[in-house]
Image: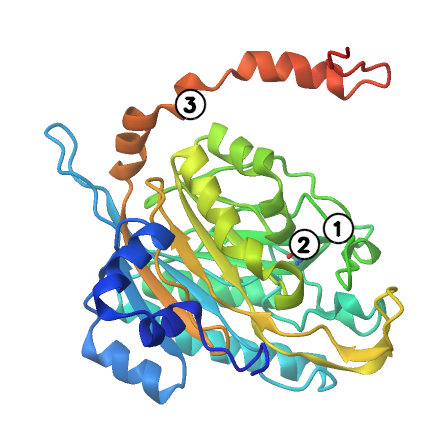
Amino acid sequence: MSACEFESLEKSLESHVPEVELSEVKRILFGKETQKLDLPACAVSAAAERDFELKGYRFEAAQEQLRPPRRIRVGLIQNHVVLPTDAPILDQVNAIHSRIGEMVEVAAMCGVNIVCFQETWTMPFAFCTREKEPWTEFAESAEEGNTTRFCQELAKKYNMIVVSPILEREGLHSTLWNTAVVISNSGNVLGKSRKNHIPRIGDFNESTYYMEGDTGHTVFQTQFGNIAVNICYGRHHPLNWFMYSMNGAEIIFNPSATVGALSEPMWSIEARNAAIANHCFTCAINRVGTEHFKSEFTSGDGRKAHHDFGHFYGSSYVAAPDGSRTPGLSRTRDGLLVVELDLNLNRQISDKWSFKMTGRYSEYAEELTKAVRHDFKPNIVKE
Ligand SMILES: NC(=O)NCCC(=O)O
C-alpha cells in the first residue's frame, strides 16, 4: 500500500487491535479519550454531499466554583488544491476560495468560533520548484488582498474569527512573507503573524521566496480567547511555541504543509508536546494530496528529477494541555475538524503541573545569553 492510500492510524488500530485492548492502547497513545461532539444533521449531510470528512470532538474541563466554563469551538480545515497547478492563477485561487467557502459554511452550522486554514491555503505548495514565476503571482496584500476581503465576508457572515495563512506581498518594495492574517469576527483585520522559521530541508526551498518573519510572537486577544499562529516549520522549535505561550496564548494554531517521507513520525508529537509543555491548546493543520508541477525539479540528493513533492498527509488534530488529543483527520481526504474546548482547562493543568512556575527561566535566559555569544565556552566537565 502506498503512503497516499493509507487512510489513518486510528482506522488501522480500530480494525486490527482486539476490542478488549483498544481503549487501553488508545489511552496510552492518545491520552484521556476525547468525547465525540454531536454535530447537526444538516452539517453532516452537507459535508457528505460536498465530499469532505467532518469530525467533531470535545475536551472537558472540571467545573469551577468561581469561574464559568469558557467553552469555544475551533474548526481546522485541510484540503487538496482544486485545479491543476498550471491552470490560470486566478482560476486556481477562485476555485480554492469556493471550496473553502463551502467548508466554512459547514463550520458555521457546527457553531465554530475560530476557523484556521492550512499554510498558504490559496495556492499549491510550489516552493519545491524554485521557480519564481508564476508562483509569486499568488502573493497578496494581507490587508487589502482579494483573499482577505473574502475572509472578511466569511468572518462577518458567520461571526467567526478566520485565521488565513497566505503568501503575502507587502508594501513599496514588494517584500514577500509567509503570513497568517487574523480576521476578527467583526470582519476587521486584527493583525498578522509571519512565519519566523524558514525551512532549508529537502524540497522545502522556501528561503528562495520569503524572509524570516518580523512580527515576533504576537498574540491576538479575541472574543473567543487569546490566540497565536506558529506557522509550519516553527513547530520544530520548542522555544517558538514557548514564546507565544509566554505572551499569553491560550490556543496556538500551526498551519502547515508537510509530506509523509519527511515529517510524519514527528507530526503527532510536536504540537501535542507543545500543548503539554505550555499549558495551552494547539491545533496542527496539514494540507492533503499530491501536487504535480509541470517543470521537473531535483531534491539535491542524487535522486532523479521529479514533478511532485510526495504526499501531504493531512492528519490535522487538536491537542490539549493535559496531553490528550483528538484523533486526526484523514491522511487522504479534505476535512473539517470541529473541536469544542473549555479554555479553563489551561489554568487547571497549570495549577496541577505548574511548569510555568517550576521553569527556571531567568537561569535559562542568562545561560542562553552567553551561549549565543561568539566567545561562548560550553559548561562541560572533563576528566
Ligand atoms: N512548510 C514547511 O515549513 N514545511 C517544512 C517541512 C516540515 O516542517 O515538516
Badge 2: how crowded within 10 Å, few (<14), some, or many (20+)?
A: many
- Left or right side of 351 for 62: left
Kind of residue at badge 2: Asn
Residues 146 and 99: in front is 99
Answer yes or no: disc 2 within 8 Å of ligand 1.
no
| Residue 190 visible in rendering | no
* Front disc: 1 or 2: 2
Q: Is residue 13 above or below residue 163?
A: below
Badge 3: how crowded within 10 Å, few (<14), some, or many (20+)?
A: some
Q: Quadrant of residue 257?
A: bottom right
User: From this viewpoint, which residue is outermost toward the left?
Assistant: 65
Q: Which mark is residue 178?
A: 2
The secondary element bearing badge 2 is classed as strand
Residue topped by disc 3: 356
Separation of marks 3 and 2 at Cα, in angstroms? 30 Å
The secondary element bearing badge 1 is classed as loop
Separation of marks 3 and 1 at Cα, in angstroms? 39 Å
**Ligand 1 placement by image quarter:** bottom right
- Left or right side of 160 for 1: right
Q: In terms of sequence position, does the residue under pointer 1 or pointer 2 come before the other? A: 1
Separation of marks 1 and 2 at Cα, in angstroms? 14 Å
Residue topped by disc 1: 171
Q: In terms of sequence position, does the residue under pointer 3 or pointer 1 come before the other? A: 1
- Left or right side of 258 for 70: left
- Residue at point 67% right, 54% down? 178
Q: How many marks?
A: 3
* Front disc: 3 or 2: 3
Badge 1: how crowded within 10 Å, few (<14), some, or many (20+)?
A: few
- Residue at point 39% right, 54% down? 318
- Residue at point 85% right, 81% down? 295
Q: Is residue 115 above or below residue 333?
A: above
Kind of residue at badge 1: Gly
